[in-house]
Image: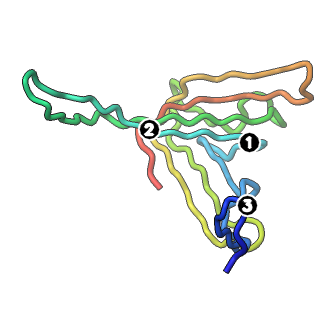
Amino acid sequence: MAKQDIFGYDKPALSSGQVASADYAVVSAGGVCALVQSVDASYTQKIEEISQVGDTQIYWLPGRPQGKLDISKLVGTGGFFKGFELGNCGKIDSAKVNVSGGRCGFKGDGMLSFSGGVVETVSMRVGTQQQTIAETISIKVSSMTK
């Protein structure tokens, strides 16, 4: 039995290798993206509440799912937005975040795939206190699978 902490909780130490590491993640958006600093992904559906006068019953009407993928990376060899292979009108056929392997014996893997993507925003950031130039691409997606 683990020793209780100051609040009275038993907190046994878990063996290492339980958590995936960002060091082993691969991000692609049309092509493999290098120097990626962060990825934020969301996938939502709007839920509308329906009710009627004189009744307390609530009905939920689900809307169309949609998602957004924000990828921030540093500008490197090849210049701005290298690795984002954009199609006509900013179309990106597929984007993926893949994790396999990790530190200290992590044996898991996983992948999130995004399809039906269109670039919504591209931006870049230069600052006096930063040695690097960063760029971000925001992609609206119609589907996310794992």
Sequence order check, earlier mark of 3 and 1: 3
- Say which of 6 and 30 sits in front: 6
Residue 6 shown left or right of residue 40 in the figure: right
x, y percentage for residue 133? 83, 27
How would you rate the neighbour count of disc 2 (Cα within 10 Å): few for under 14, some for 14-19, many for 20 or more? some
How would you rate the neighbour count of disc 1 (Cα within 10 Å): few for under 14, some for 14-19, many for 20 or more? some
x, y percentage for residue 32? 67, 47
- Say which of 104 and 30 sits in front: 104
Label 3 sits on a secondary structure element that is loop
Q: Are marks 2 and 1 in contact (CB under 8 Å)?
A: no
**How many marks are shown on the rendered structure?**
3
The residue to which callout 2 is attached is 116
Q: Is residue 114 above or below residue 46?
A: below
Mark sitting on residue 36: 1
**Amino acid, disc 1:** Val
Real-space Cα separation, disc 3 to disc 2, in angstroms: 51 Å
Label 1 sits on a secondary structure element that is strand
Real-space Cα separation, disc 3 to disc 1, in angstroms: 40 Å
**Amino acid, disc 3:** Ile
**Amino acid, disc 2:** Gly
Sequence order check, earlier mark of 2 and 1: 1
Real-space Cα separation, disc 2 to disc 1, in angstroms: 22 Å
Mark sitting on residue 135: none
Q: Do the residues labelled 3 and 2 touch (CB within 8 Å)?
A: no
Mark sitting on residue 6: 3
Sequence order check, earlier mark of 3 and 2: 3
x, y percentage for residue 68? 51, 34
x, y percentage for residue 109? 60, 65
Residue under the point 72% across and 53% down: 22
